Each structure stands twice: as C-alpha cells, then as structure tokens.
Image (cartoon, rainbow, N blue to C red):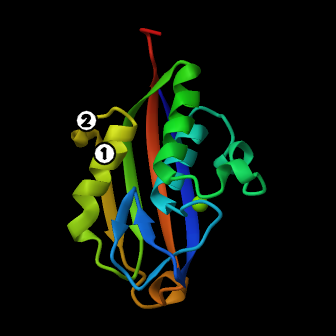
Amino acid sequence: MRVGIGHDTHRLVEGRPLILAGVTIPHPRGLMGHSDADVVMHAVADALLGAAALGDIGEHFPDTDPRWKGIAGRDLLAQVYEMVRSRGWVAVNIDVTIHAQSPKLSPYKQTMAAHLAETLALNLSDVNVKAKTGEGVGPVGLGEIIGCDAAALIRANQFD
Ligand code: MG
C-alpha cells in the first residue's frame, strides 16, 4: 500500500463557472484556470500521482499545452487514474478537504463524493468530502481563492 497527498488552489473571479468535483455550483464567481479549474479533481489527481510516485499534474498536463485547455477535471482525473492503474495500482480510499469561505458546500458534498467514486470506480463508502471555511481571514476567508487538500491510498492490484 502507498499513500499520497495533493493540494490545489485557484483564484475566484467573475465570469467563470464554479466547478468542484464535477459539480457546477451556483455562485457569482468561479475559479480561474487554463482548464475548468476544478480544484477537487486536481488535488485528488495529484494525490494519486503522489502515491504512485508519478510526479504531478503540472508535468502530465502542462498549462502551456493547448490540448489541455478547458479539460474537465473529471477527464483529467480519469486519465491520471488510467496512468496509475497501468502501473499496477488501484485506489483504496480518497479523503478530501475543500477550503472555501462561500458558497456553503454541504448541499453538494454527497454529489461531489459520488463523482469521485464514479471516476475512480470506488464505492461511495471509500470517498469522503469535507468542507472548511477560512474563518473570514486570509485568502480563503476573504473569498480570493478556493483550495483543496486530498489524500489517496492505493494498493498493488494483484489481479493485473
Ligand atoms: Mg488546478
């Protein structure tokens, strides 16, 4: 078994949709990025790459490459997981903490977990999504950014 951690942060700006773990959340602002800026999918992808010692998403999906412009976080995570699986690993469980002052994420946590579980072929009981505010201070608390931390456990797939 191996463990990996991932982190991602994107700036909140006007004129962009807010997409977290593949859920489009009604909000006056969204996350800026070359892709869909889905911090949750990106943090989980990095956690999986970390566990498998395969680098980070910046190496595999450089934002200078037009191929990845607007790529959905879910597709990116699916591609990363394909890479991880091809090295003989499967995911065991995923834990995520989203850092956002607003909007309130509790109504969306189950759907976010379902999207992660679906993308990684896990049971819903193997995926956990938590949300924290920034207590009104710092870049999270002032609503300048949304961040995400993720941990992933993988195990060798003895059936491959
Ligand atoms: Mg990102």
How far apart are labels 2 and 1 at the CA level? Answer: 7 Å
The answer to whether 43 is drawn above or below residue 153 in the figure is below
Horizontal and vertical percent position of residue 5: 53, 48
Q: Is residue 24 left or right of residue 49?
A: left
Q: Is residue 131 left or right of residue 63?
A: left
Ligand 1 within 8 angstroms of badge 1 C-beta: no
- Could you tell me which residue is drawn at 39 percent across and 82 percent down? 101
Horizontal and vertical percent position of residue 86: 57, 21
The answer to whether 145 is drawn above or below residue 92 in the figure is below
Q: Tell which of 143 and 134 is nearer to you.
A: 143
Q: Tell which of 149 and 2 is nearer to you.
A: 149
Indicate which quadrant contains ligand 1. Answer: bottom right
The answer to whether 109 is drawn above or below residue 153 in the figure is below
Q: Is residue 69 left or right of residue 115?
A: right
Horizontal and vertical percent position of residue 64: 78, 56
Q: Tell which of 104 and 131 is nearer to you.
A: 104
- Could you tell me which residue is drawn at 56 percent across and 62 percent down? 8
Furthest residue toward top: 159
Amino acid type of disc 2? Asn
Secondary structure under badge 1?
A: strand
Residue linked to disc 2: 123
Q: Is residue 147 left or right of residue 125?
A: right
- Could you tell me which residue is drawn at 65 percent across and 47 percent down? 57
Residue linked to disc 1: 127
- Could you tell me which residue is drawn at 27 percent across and 47 percent down? 114
Q: How many marks?
A: 2
Q: Tell which of 24 and 154 is nearer to you.
A: 24
Ligand 1 within 8 angstroms of badge 2 C-beta: no
User: Looking at the rendered structure, which numbered label has been put on residue 111?
Assistant: none
Amino acid type of disc 1? Val
Horizontal and vertical percent position of residue 138: 53, 87
CB atoms at circles 2 and 1 under 8 Å apart?
Answer: yes
